[in-house]
Image: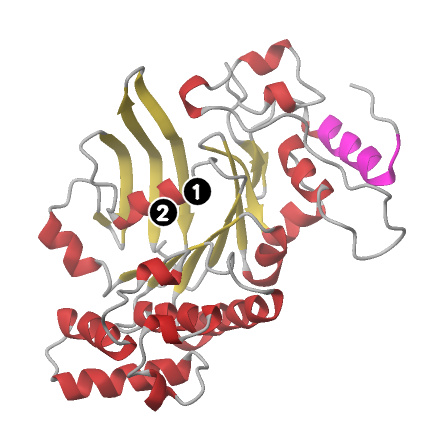
Amino acid sequence: MSADAPLLVVEDLTVSFRGDEGLVQAVGGVSFTVKQREIVGVVGESGSGKSQTLLAIMGLIDSPRAVVSGSIRFMGQELIGLNRQALDAIRGRQIAMIFQDPMSALTPVHTIGNQIGEQVRAHEKVSARAARARAVQLLDAVGIANPGRVVDGYPHQLSGGMRQRAVIAMALSCNPVLLVADEPTTALDVTVQAQILELIGRLRDEFGSAVILVTHDLGVVAEVADQVLVMYGGRIVEEGGKGSVFRTPLHPYTWGLFGSIAPMEGERPARLAAIPGAPPSLSNLPTGCAFGPRCAYHHDDCLVRPPLVGAGGHRAACVLPETKRRHLKIQKAAGLEMQQ
């Protein structure tokens, strides 16, 4: 694969589940690419389709009620439709996942070293002793103090931050080219969170891994991401480089996400802005723009689903003219009254 070729190409990915009322669409027509050594941050509220997108990439949606369609090409190979044996050869070795809750991701009755070693031996022909030595090296690489002792410990004997580092070490055990991280810092305090984010950034530099990082925290994205995908109602509503999205967000939903964060400079508001209403039910999505019922600028044109449009790699799914959106964003940032 050439250095300029995208590592992962997702096109029109749809994930639905059969229910009593028919198909419920959790992910609806998501398309994006991940370049080599790139960190892509995926943000959005709970229920926006972030985790289901990751599980589809990993081939971990195996419910008989699930329907997965579209295309997921990894290093040129189509993943949708691959049999279990072929997927197992890729998962863990070339694509690895860091799960949100390390306690449930680790088996409580096996030591940390055995679990990391099992991952290594599943993909490489090495002895148990060599696999254990590899586990010690990996635990040391992710910043765990005294890895020679921790390798023989059980998950319940470690702190939350140490367990998360152990899960990251396991993900790195076979030097994957793509790491898929599902909210890896959610359950951690802010000090440990900062350490994990620094570690993820270092992984890209030292191991050459690309990363898809799912989170609901824009601060996490600001720390490590190169590209940003904003999801709502199972779809991407804005995408672009981190600098563009953070400096000039184009979608009203993205404005709402930024408005819920206390400013780092200037006068602190008496009350943070909140997005009115609640995320839509996936079994009863609004017609057209899913964010429409919560948007202050909703009008008749929004009843048709808007495509992602924009220039310079920065696109948003909003029917408001881009010049008007930018004007409204400036007004909002200035604290002025906004008129539709």
Decide if residue 55 is on the left or right side of residue 278.
left
Report which residue position mark 2 lands on. 54
**Residue at 42% over, 56% down:** 100
The residues bearing labels 2 and 1 have C-alpha atoms spaced at a distance of 7 Å
Res. 257 visible in picture: yes
Decide if residue 201 is on the left or right side of residue 14.
right
The overriding secondary structure of the stretch rendered in magenta is helix
In front of the other: 113 or 140: 113
Disc 1 element: helix
**Residue at 28% over, 33% down:** 70
In front of the other: 93 or 64: 64
In front of the other: 257 or 32: 257
In the displayed structure, would residue 57 be above or below residue 332? below
Which disc is residue 63 wearing? none
In front of the other: 48 or 299: 48
Q: Position of residue 114 (x, y in %)?
A: 21, 76
Q: Mark 2 packing: few (<14 Cα in 10 Å), some, or many (20+)?
A: some
Label 2 close to label 1 by CB (< 8 Å):
yes
In the displayed structure, would residue 17 be above or below residue 160? above
In the displayed structure, would residue 77 be above or below residue 296? below
* Residue type indicated by callout 1: Lys
Decide if residue 102 is on the left or right side of residue 243.
left
Disc 2 element: helix
Report which residue position mark 1 lands on. 50
- Count how many numbered circles sit on residues in the image: 2
Q: Position of residue 109 (x, y in %)?
A: 23, 69
**Residue at 44% over, 42% down:** 50
Q: Which residues are magenta?
A: 323-336
Res. 97 visible in picture: no
